[in-house]
Amino acid sequence: MPIEVRNLTHTYMPGTPFEKTALDDVSFTIGDGEFVGLIGHTGSGKSTLIMHLNGLLKPTSGEVIVDGLNLAEKGVSLRAVRERVGLVFQYPEYQLFEETVVADVMFGPKNLGLSEAECRARAEEALGQVGLRDAALWEKSPFELSGGQKRRVAIAGVLAMKPGTLILDEPTAGLDPRGRDEIMGLMKDIHAAGTTLIMVSHSMTDVSRLCGRILVMNRAKLTIDAAPAQVFADEKRIREAGLTLPPCAVLAEKLRAAGFEGIPREAYTQETVARAILAALGKGDAACK
Amino acid sequence: MQMTIGQYFPGDSPLHRMDPRAKILCTIALIAGVFIAQNLWAYALLFAFAFGVIAVSRIDARFIVKGLKPILFIMAFTFVINMFFTADGVELFSWRFIHITDKGLKSATLMALRLVLLVMTTQLLTLSTSSIALTDGIEALLKPLSKVGFPAHELAMMMSIAMRFIPTLMEETDKIMKAQMARGAEFESGNLIQRAKAMLPLLVPLFVSAFRRADELALAMEARCYRGGQGRTRMKQLKYSRLDAIGAAITLAVVVAAAII
Ligand SMILES: Nc1ncnc2c1ncn2[C@@H]1O[C@H](COP(=O)(O)OP(=O)(O)OP(=O)(O)O)[C@@H](O)[C@H]1O
Ligand SMILES: [Mg+2]
């Protein structure tokens, strides 16, 4: 179920003094089972881009093709598209509205026209997926939960629609380190279960930990589209885009410059860099832990 | 953005630079003029003046036209009512119970023109004045009334807070709507009851966040020692200039002329 974006341009409020081109001639294709990180400075157009992928925004020009369906064509059911591409917004906890957690998660499946029993089964499965297995919690009001729990309920609300592709807009924003790790772990699991994932982020570190491919946005344009190792090799362009390398990639680069040539470019996460340093020092993998 | 009433169109024209108090008073005078004016010539004069002001303000005319759209229905309605229910005058057309007279046609036209003029003049005020300047102006004009216990400052503060949060709430509405649409919600289809029901997933989060914001704002204001208007000074003092005198003189001349033609 590939997603194809061709020459996508989007202008907000055209013809007014507030006119703003948020996307400028963006093209890429995302294949099945990929885990893509979408990164860029504030206002670079990331949120605008992902809202095109399930038809929430219409392109000013260019096209978006999901699973062979051209979203601009007449007669394409947007509901069918939204069933295929799930979108979790930034701070999704602000969309919760139902009386109970489980009812809120059932909202999506209900909109797909599924039976009550099917909706309930999907909701329970999705809540389990996000680690909320305690059935006592399901009957609580979503407004009584903690921030991290609310966010997981909101993610479950989209997961329950069983989308083939899941997009998350800054899923770790505003969470403490532990909540962050939990969400990152959750995304890893969802990806492992066969869902295509797109994660929007400000943080190179977060993106480098999980993603197999990184798209970098800079002022409405897509400037880099490559695997992490290649992306981090192009420090100049990353700086131009107003971003910084993950600290471990910087460390590895500095060590290489200082003569430790054995540290490979493929090492950029905490774990891989640690291993590479140990190997370079002649110590075995065993010393890693 | 569909709503343009109450939206500021930034610029640096003489109209933008006028003191908000002067602009408010001129607008009130013009509104009075619209109600006093009784014949087509007077309306022609007021329209000419309004178009002149639009030209001077360099406000995109499309914004003004957009602002007229919401009143189109009311205009059509009053036009029809006036046309069909004026009985006296020379009959122009008659079919069963419908009688259209020349007087009816005239009063219907004048009524429609009056509505357009009213909206246009108030729009010129709100499009050329930022909401902060507008509330400052209203507060200054109402100040004399605070001697008799009228809460001028509080009223102005409430208005400026409300205006400050209109765009925020609209943005928030848009965001929550999109989030629910991503979960398959539809806001634009179905019958009236279905539509009203579909609003629930939008309204609940909106109210929750509005209350949260109100709470936070009250705290933030208190933390900065806000205690109402007493003894408060302003960073930007309002000052009348020659521009205001000229603007007021022209406006007054137009209104008087419209009244006596
Ligand atoms: N509804 C809107 N109307 C007008 N302009 C908008 C709207 N939404 C976004 N913009 C503008 O479009 C540009 C891109 O916004 P977008 O939200 O896509 O950026 P982003 O990369 O998601 O930023 P962030 O990291 O802050 O979330 C910004 O300059 C923003 O001001
Ligand atoms: Mg964003």
Image (tube, coloured by chain):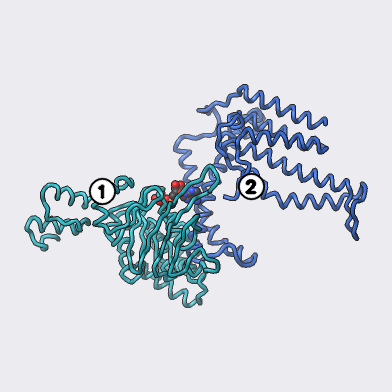
Chain colours: A cyan, B blue
Tag 1: residue type?
Answer: Glu
Quadrant in the rendering for residue A183 = bottom left
Query: What is the distance, in whole Å, between disc 1 and disc 2 at their CAs?
Result: 48 Å
Q: Is residue B211 visible?
A: no
Quadrant in the rendering for residue A123 = bottom left
Numbered label attached to residue B101: none
Q: Is residue B3 visible?
A: yes
Q: Residue at x 18, y 50 (%)?
A: A253
Left or right: residue B16 versus residue A117 is: right
Q: Percent position (x, y) of residue A233? A: 23, 52
Of B238 and B96, which appears nearest the observer? B96
Residue at mark 1: A235
Q: Residue at x 44, y 38 (%)?
A: B223
Residue at mark 2: B66
Disc 2: CA contacts within 10 A as few (<14), some (14-19) or many (>=20): some
- Asked if A58 appears above or below B221 in the picture, the reply is below
Tag 2: residue type?
Answer: Lys
Outermost residue on the top side: it is B242
